[in-house]
Amino acid sequence: MNFSKVLRIITIGIIAFGCGNSSKAVKSNFLIQTNAKKNIISNAEVLKLSLKNLNAMQVDSVQFMMNNTPISNLEDLKDVALGEKMIKASVYYDDVKEVVLQKLIVVNNKKPKLYTYELVNTYAHDINSYTQGLEFYNGILYESTGQYGESKLRALDYKNGKVIRNINLAPTYFGEGLTVLNDKIYQLTWREGRGLIYDVDNFQAIGSFKYGQSKEGWGLCNDGQQLYKTDGSENIWILNSNTLEEERFVQAYTNKGKLANLNELEWVNGKIYANRYQKNGVAVINPRNGAIEAVIDFKDLKNKVTNHPGLDVLNGMAYNPKTQTLFLTGKRWDKLFEVRIIAQD
């Protein structure tokens, strides 16, 4: 499969910024110049910054910043997170400070690889479940489902589909992704701006948390220390597991552009697996810088489930560390698939 087909799997849109200064100060004496073509540069390059002095002003000093972090005029980008950046130049002359701004996009230096998979097992799944999130914890599969008036939280025996424990959410909540950390279940709601917290053993509600800058709740996972959350954009928000505050975010990018509509998340061996809403592909993302390192095409799985009027898209991933396999299903799918990912060099 060639790379153009890989990109069609996840339908990545490329956002390019025009050349020139994107936000000029009142006194337009200077412009920021870079070696980025059309304001897009790879993280394998060194960003070269200079100042165009439009009116031959006698400059005393210049300070460059990237997203409010000081940088030099020759900045190695290998450790910089991908995505949109704001370059700011503070120019000092004649006891005056002038600020000049320039947008920049940092993309990955490599194309995503194409991973494949081996189908290991197929299990029964509740055809009525509008699956939003899946996760294994101590051998039990936990599932969050959506739709107003239908949303649930469940613990399942995945081998026979038996429901071990179930609670219904209030009809005003639309359930979304979930994750389990330190014996607590964290479940997102869609547009209600609130996450719900339960005791993993009895599903007793023990708290809630409000979203910060991310306006919606989509997918959720954890790395054993902190939580990762999507909101339907290219952003993956990183939450402090103690305060549940959004401390920062990374942006999912390939070598060409961003991947928006990130939905369900799963932590797999140090990487974030993310599917895109309404798509059959899953992106393998580096959590450090947001680089999309690989994609997996799961479109054939939908052909293996029962076709019916309510059938919807792929959604729901859970990695079982005991079997080292990934479990996938979809919204109102009657099957749960166990697969083994085959990574390509």
Image: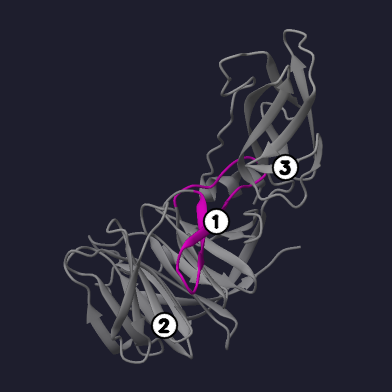
User: Mark 3 or 1 closer to N-term?
Assistant: 3
| Residue 239 falls inside the magenta stretch | yes
Instruction: Report the residue at 56% width, 36% height from top.
Output: 14
Quadrant into which the C terminus falls: bottom right
Instruction: Report the residue at 51% width, 45% height from top.
Output: 11
Image position, residue 29 (x, y; %): 67, 13
Instruction: Report the residue at 72% width, 10% height from top.
Output: 54
Q: CA distance from mark 2 to mark 3?
A: 39 Å
Image position, residue 286 (x, y; %): 65, 60
Residue labelled with disc 2: 184
Q: Is residue 267 left or right of residue 187?
A: right
Circle 3: residue type: Pro
Q: Image height check: is 55 above or below 223?
A: above
Highlighted range, magenta: 234-261
Element type at mark 3: strand
Q: CA distance from mark 2 to mark 1?
A: 22 Å
Foreground residue among 325 and 144: 144
Foreground residue among 83 and 209: 209
Image position, residue 24 (x, y; %): 58, 20
Q: Image height check: is 104 above or below 57?
A: below
Q: Image height check: is 273 above or below 257?
A: below
User: In the image, which disc is placed on residue 248?
Assistant: 1
Residue labelled with disc 3: 70
Q: Is residue 298 left or right of residue 62?
A: left
Q: CA distance from mark 3 to mark 1?
A: 18 Å
User: In the image, which disc is placed on residue 3?
Assistant: none
Q: Are marks 2 and 3 in contact (CB under 8 Å)?
A: no
In the current view of this chain or complex, which residue is farthest to the front?
95
| Residue 278 falls inside the magenta stretch | no
Instruction: Report the residue at 66% width, 55% height from top.
Output: 289
